Image: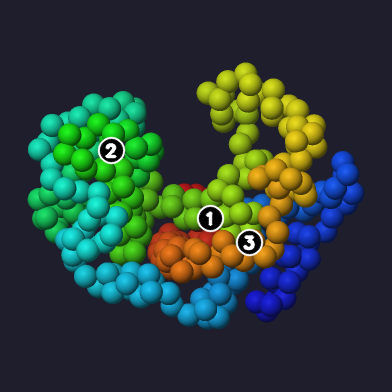
Amino acid sequence: MSDEEIIERYYELRDQKIAWGGGYYYPNIQKLFLTPFEREKDRREIALWQKKYGKSETEKWYEEAKDKSCVWWLENHLIARHAFNSCMSCGTCTAACPAAEFYDYDPRLIMEVVQSKDEERIIELLKADTIWYCGQCGTCKLRCPRGNNPFALISSLRQLSQIKGYHVCSERGSQQYTGRHLWGGNFWNRGCCLYFRNTMLPFHLDFGPRFARYTFNKEEIYRRVGGCPDMDGSMPGRKVHPDTLHEIRRCWQEGGTLYLWDQIEKYAQEQAREWNMDIDDYFYKV
């Protein structure tokens, strides 16, 4: 199928609707979610977007940064510059970090590596699982006596790792490909990072009995509150209007997100070939 045919077919299926609870229900949104068909449509659609709108200012900067040193990135990337002042290795960030309680993870050491400006140590860090353990909760920022923002700095390091392709050297880094199509696909196609049907009770027992009640009664709850990506309604969780979705996509394109997705896609395709598997098998493996 041509790019236009596969995109047209996807939206034709996605927008089929039936009357439901005084509004409309879109049964195929759930069926299309995260399928190989949706992932292939996204690849082609985003490629056409890149051709149509050209390179944004942010994307051009990312391309320049790709050929620069890691130290240059840390000295010039806006997030990194605002996230790091100086570190006295007090360990407050690690002491307060929820992730450090459960993983072999020490944000203080990350700050130490960044402060060293040692290119080889930074590259080693970008190739490790370490930077992917952070839950981006922000606890470290609130505790740091020097006013550093470790979790924002880690976010910056993650972008650098993806741009240079170092992320595929680690297990957690390779999983960014799944994340790109899971959360990225949710954003691109449904306008929200978490599609309400993503969460399954057996994998989220820690959410407690209230979540269990919601899981068993979610169709009734959706109908009652009018908020679900599969239906029209007045709540924020409703099916996003195509014009609104277009505006959101333009924000991501201008902000460089599509370029980062392209890099994740590129390095995943390369690693899939190295592992002698197609990209869909790779998706499920990582």
Q: Mark 1 sits on what residue?
A: 184
**Tag of residue 108:** none
Residue 99, percent across and down? 34, 32
Q: Amino acid at mark 3?
A: Leu
Q: Amino acid at mark 1?
A: Gly
Q: What scheme was used to colour the molecule? A: rainbow
Kindly report which numbered mark, 3 or 1, lies closer to the viewer in this rendering: 3
**Tag of residue 141:** 2
- Element under label 2? helix
Query: Within 10 Å of the Cα at label 3, are there few (<14), some (14-19), or many (20+) other Cα atoms?
Result: some
Contact check, label 2 and label 1, Cβ < 8 Å = no
Left or right of 95 on screen, residue 99: right
Q: Quadrant of residue 49?
A: bottom right
Q: Amino acid at mark 2?
A: Lys
Residue at (28, 34) in percent of width and height: 142
Is tag 3's residue or tag 2's residue first in the polypeptide sequence? 2
Is tag 2's residue or tag 1's residue first in the polypeptide sequence? 2
In this rendering, does residue 75 appear at all? yes
Residue at (61, 54) in percent of width and height: 191
Residue 279 sits above or below residue 86 on the image:
below
Q: CA distance from mark 3 to mark 2?
A: 32 Å
Q: Mark 3 sits on what residue?
A: 245
Residue 27 sits above or below residue 264 on the image:
above
Is tag 3's residue or tag 1's residue first in the polypeptide sequence? 1
Kindly report which numbered mark, 2 or 1, lies closer to the viewer in this rendering: 2
Query: Within 10 Å of the Cα at label 1, are there few (<14), some (14-19), or many (20+) other Cα atoms?
Result: many
Query: Within 10 Å of the Cα at label 2, are there few (<14), some (14-19), or many (20+) other Cα atoms?
Result: some
Residue at (62, 18) in percent of width and height: 209
- Element under label 3? helix
Residue 63, percent across and down? 33, 73
